[in-house]
Structures are given as C-alpha cells and as structure tokens.
Image (cartoon, rainbow, N blue to C red):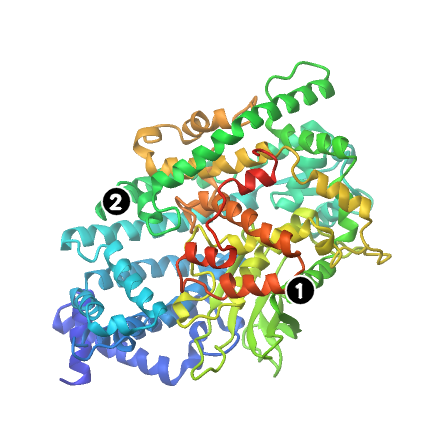
Amino acid sequence: MTTKSILITAVCALSGLSMLQAEETVQAVAAVEQQAVQQQAEHPYFQDKPYPAWSKMTPEQGIRDTRAALALARERIAAVCRVTPEQATFENTFLALNLASDELGQAQGYMHHLSSVMDNEELRQAQESLIPELTAFDAAILANEKLWEVIKNAAAQPWVKELSPAKQRFVQQTVDSFVDSGADLPADKKARKAEIERELSELTLQFGKNVLDSTNAWKLLIVNKDELAGMSEDWMNKAQAEARARGFGSDEKPCWLITLDYTSIGTVMRDCDVEATRKMCWEGQSTIGAVGEWDNASTVARVMELRRELAELLGFKTYADMTTHRRMVGGGDNAMAFIDNMAEKVLPAFRDECRQLLEYVSAKKGSNVMFLDPWDRRYYLNKMSQELYSFDPEELRPYHRADNVVNGMFAIYGKLLGVSFAEVPTMCLEKGSVCPEGVVEVWHPEVKVFKVTDNKTGAHLGSFYMDLFPRASKRAGAWVMPMRYGRAGENGAPHEPHLACLVGNLSTPTEDKPALFTHYDVQTIFHEFGHMMHCMLGDTELQAHCGTSVAWDFVELPSQIFENWTWYPEGIAQYAFHYETGAPMPAELIEKLQKSRYFMPATDTMGQLCYGKLDLEMHMNYNEKFKGKSLDLATNQLLDPWRLPMSVSAPSFMRHLTHCITGGYSAGYYSYKWAEVLSADAFTRFKKEGIMNPATGAAFREAVLSKGDSKDAAAVYRDFMGRDPNPDALLQAQGLVK
C-alpha cells in the first residue's frame, strides 16, 4: 500500500469521509505536513525552539498552525493504527500516541495563554472558529475503533510486565483514559458525546468572555477625596495615576479611579472608612457575570445540564464521580463527605466567631446589628484584627518591595531545593522585528524571564516567564502554566529544559515608588512559585508524567506548603527590607504578623468550604437543587447556614468562578482544602527538622517535586512523610481542634 493510500484510509477512519473526499483532504494534509516538517519556522505556535516567538503568534497564525498540527496528529495516529500485535512495542503504540498531538497541544496552549494575558477580539474569534475542528478531532480518536483495538491488544502483551513501573503505570493510564472517555460506547452515544463536548467548549469560552468583559466594564470615578477617607497615600497615588491614564482628572482637579482589579477594589473594601463608597464597590463586584449581555446564569445552567448528561452517558452517577474517581479522594461522595465533615468540625467555632463579629460591629455602629451588610464584612474584620493585635497589614508593605520579595524567594527556594536562578535579557517585539542573539522575546514589556540551574550538576533545568502586574487584557487571579516539559535524556543525560509561566495581578508601582506588595501578594507569589518548582524540578522517565501532571487534589500541595515561609522569621528575613532604608522588618512587626495569621480561622475556613460545597452540589445534585430555580436563590438557600448572616444576598459566585467552569476545578474546588490539609501535615516535618534545612528540602524535591505523576499521589506523600496524612492537621494548626 502506498503512503498516499494509507493516509486516505486513515483520514476515512478518523473523520468518516468518503474515499473521494478523503483523497481531496489528503492532498491538503500532505501539503501541510510538508510545511510543518520542512518549514517549521512558518509555524511559530509549535516551533521547536527553547523560547517562543510571541510577536509572530497572531490570531490568524494560530488558526494556520492549529490546522497544521491537526494534520500532523492525524498522520501519526494513522501510523499507530497500522501497528499489529506482533509489531507492537511501548514506543510505537503508547508513546507514539502520547506524542502524536505534541504540536497541537503546544499550539492550543499558547493560544490559551495569550487569551489569558493579552486578550483581544481577534484572538477570541480565532479560538471560536477552531472549536468545531478540535471537537471533531477528539471525537474521531474516540470513534477510531482500530486505534482502540491496537491499544487494547498492546496492553495485553507479555512485554508490558517487563516495562519499568512508570511505563506500566502509563500503559494502564492510557487504557483507563480510553475507557473513561467512552471508547466502548456504541456509535450513537459517541456521536452524542461529541455534540456535548462541542457545546461545552463554546459555552465555557463564552463564560470566560463574559467574566472578563463585565470585569473590565465596571469603573468607579471618585472626584471628592473625602469619599476615600482611610485609604493610604500609596493607593491614592495609584488610583489618581490610573484615572489620568484613562483621560480623567488633572493636577488642578484630581480624581481617583477604582476598578475591579483586586489590588484596587479589594483594598477599598478593606480600608475605606466611607460606607457609601464600599457599598458602591460591592455593587460593582456584584455585576461580574451577572448583568445584561454578560449574565452567566443561563450559561452555568446549560453547562451543568450537559456535564450531568455527559457523566451519565459514560456510566457515572454524577459528573463529580466522573472527575474524581481516579483522584486521591476516590469519588464524588467522598469529596462531599470531606467538605461536610470539615464543616461539622468547624461550625461551633464559626458560630462563636459570628457572634463576636456582630457584637463588634454593633459596638462600632452604636446599635444592635443582627445582619452584616456585605460591604462591611472585610472592613470590620480588618478593623477588629487591627485592634486585637495592634497591627495594620499596611505596615508590612514598605518592607515588601517586589524585587526584594522575588530575590528573597529565589534565595529560599534555592537553598532548600538546590537550585539557582538567573535573569535573562528580554525584549517585547513589534510584528516583523527580529530578536537579537542572546535576548528572549516576551509578550509584554513588564514580563521577565529566568533560567533555573541545578547547583550540583550545573544542568539547565528549565526557564520561566514572570508576568506579575494587572492590565485590562489579562484575566484576574494568579496561576502557573506549564508550556513545555523537556523530554528525558538518554544514557544518563539530563532532560531537556522545561518551560513555564507565572502570571499574577499583584500591587503595581507608582510614579514615585516601586511596587510594594501586601502580605497577601507575597503569599500569592510564594504559592504560585511552589507550582513553578513542581514544573522546573520534574525529572521523570516519561514526559507525560512530569511536573504538575498529577492527581488534581494533590497538585496544590507544593504550592500551599511554601506559603508557610511568608509567616516565619527565617523566611521573612530573606526578603523583607524597607524599600527606602534597607532595614530588615522589625521583630515586633513579624510577631504581630504571626499572631494575626489565624484571626477568625473558622470564618476563613467556612468561606473556602462554601466554594467547595457549591461546586460539588451543582455537579452532583443539579437537577434536585438547582434546575428551574434562580441560581442566586438556590445558592443562598444552600450556603446561608455556612455563612455570616448578611442583610443583602450577593449574586451566586458561580456566575464568575472561572476555576469551576472554564478551568480544571469543576467538581474539584474541594481539592484546595484537601491539599491544604496535606500541606499543613507535611510542613510539620519542616518545622521539626528546620524550615531552612536543605536536607529536608532535598527530600521534598526528591520525593514530591521530581516525581510528578510517575507514582500514585498517596505513595508519593508516604515517601516524604513515612505515613498517611493526618486529616486534622490543618484544623490543629489553626487551633480549631485538638
């Protein structure tokens, strides 16, 4: 059989085309294949170079490169389909299938990344235009009975038992992924599954657009300075500069702009003494995903209905069962029990804290307050904490110069994990420009790039981008995105360097001051850098097992455990120096910070449990508790017993909780608390052996960070701790249980 005939047959099998249609398609595929292989420079979205050429990644190019990558993937899958049981090896079946979509995954990853950090309408339209093709590709793999037959036959061969443990694990994971994806479904159900996934792709994309657009749409311009009483000079200067940048105000008539960026509105909700201003800000927050053309309620409803149908189609009782049955928690009911059991333990302390807060607010307002206004919640919690500990969190900010925090963080991680960090020269290019030799291209002038080197071997482990400050084109929050995991070296050689990106929306510099972080900012960057080290220190036999490719309810352990260094003097001493004098943070200020750590711990815990509870209930009991009802009303009925008594109900946070709709935390938000339990328990070893002890850090690197998904998450945890987790570790650390 000729190569052309083979490709025609493969295209027929993958897409259901006639032989004549396939003939025409193959001609196009062959042309694209030749371009992709021989002229890869024309495909910047999957160019095989250490660093991407961002200026070449236009939306139009994204469409072209995605289609080229689809052609490559189809041809490689067709090759796997031709493997007979006698010819089958690990390399030409499981590994070949895993690598078949490398370029496609990279192209789509970069498009998703750019939409998160440099969003624009053209990129959105490009992503939308590709949804039918990408959905059809995924459906074609599932419908390809020959491919499934090859994989099943290969998995049953005797040589599988001779493979390394990591490869045997990967074989089973591949088989499981086919089964979980419905490979054994009849044709009509496979077709319905493809329809569901196509619609879900469109809905989740629309959800994210609505959140971003409604966030950017709201702004509050303040022209009377008295309306911002209580705000710091730094915040006022930033808000005034933001207003001027948008064409508002002058030196003679200044004004101040509040946006829905957390560093803007969050500080107002905490510090502003003027209730009317706080109320307007709360009302602004309540518009995210909740008003007019950006109302996400119907989108959420349809997503939940489709996810329920998808789970039932695949043989699961609920969508939560579908997503969690291979995670540490082992099923939706177990996840719900985890959330409910923790709430049961915390509720007595929570009710007592509610009483304390209402008594405090009543005393401040001079009247008996039985229900808290939602715009007062953060303000009075902050005031109560300040009085209790004689401590204002803003006192920390002068000691948190951004550069010092980053360098100190590098020192801490470097000492514990045996690595070094070096900044690389960068440049943001216009389209058509050429990047000079030795310079790394970035997508925005504020982005920095760092190389990570192993101290013992001198090996270049990986590089990462750091994009820390908010802008209108960037979605809210903070995250780490693995961009590429380097393949393992042969004959003892080090793996190829990894590549990842850390993105944040932290406090920005002003005209007269550098960026000065809040303690929350510092915690955030330490948290995300734990994810980054999970990416950079991955050293697995298989690329597919590297870094954060772990059970979803284990992935937050490395990030959450490293937040601890922001609370202890040994860690703080590495980064906290006054930005003007260089003086270290005073010991008495550190002591106040530590005392404030577990202020109202039950209230904080119940707030997080509410997110996990709503996420699970919607993905397990949508028809029974939400269908046909107002999303906001149903949310409040579910969660009011777990929340502070409020005078006004807010719109459901599921309207804008991208984690659970567009991100990977659907039926998985519980995993934040799950991993927080793990991290609290694992940190007890650091406290026992010394939180700056390189030997303990090396053990954590070897047992946890390097292993990725090459071992079961529970086994990885036992390798580090020598035992199973203590389920009460977090509540014990917070003083909520003995």
Q: Which residue is mark 1?
A: 410
Q: Quadrant of the N terminus?
A: bottom left
Q: Secondary structure at mark 2?
A: loop
Task: Tell me the crowding category of disc 2: few under 14, some 14 to 19, or many 20 or more residues within 10 angstroms, Cα based.
Answer: some
**Image: 171 above or below 302:** below
Looking at the image, residue 366 sits to the left or right of residue 163; the answer is right
Q: For residue 202, which numbered disc appears in the image?
A: none
Residue type, mark 2 in image: Phe
Q: How many numbered marks appear?
A: 2
- The reply to whether residue 506 is in sight is no
- The reply to whether residue 694 is in sight is yes
User: Which residue appears farthest toward the right when viewing the image?
Assistant: 581
* Residue at 19% in and 61% down: 143
The percent position of residue 558, horizontal first and vertical second, equals: 54, 56
* Residue at 41% in and 28% down: 634
- CB-based contact (under 8 Å), mark 2 and mark 1: no
Q: Earlier in the sequence, mark 2 or mark 1?
A: 2
Q: Quadrant of the C terminus?
A: top right
Task: Tell me the crowding category of disc 1: few under 14, some 14 to 19, or many 20 or more residues within 10 angstroms, Cα based.
Answer: many
Looking at the image, residue 335 sits to the left or right of residue 623; the answer is right
The percent position of residue 43, horizontal first and vertical second, equals: 42, 76
Q: For residue 316, which numbered disc appears in the image?
A: 2
Q: Secondary structure at mark 1?
A: helix
* Residue at 79% in and 55% down: 513
**Image: 98 above or below 508:** below
**Image: 26 above or below 58:** below
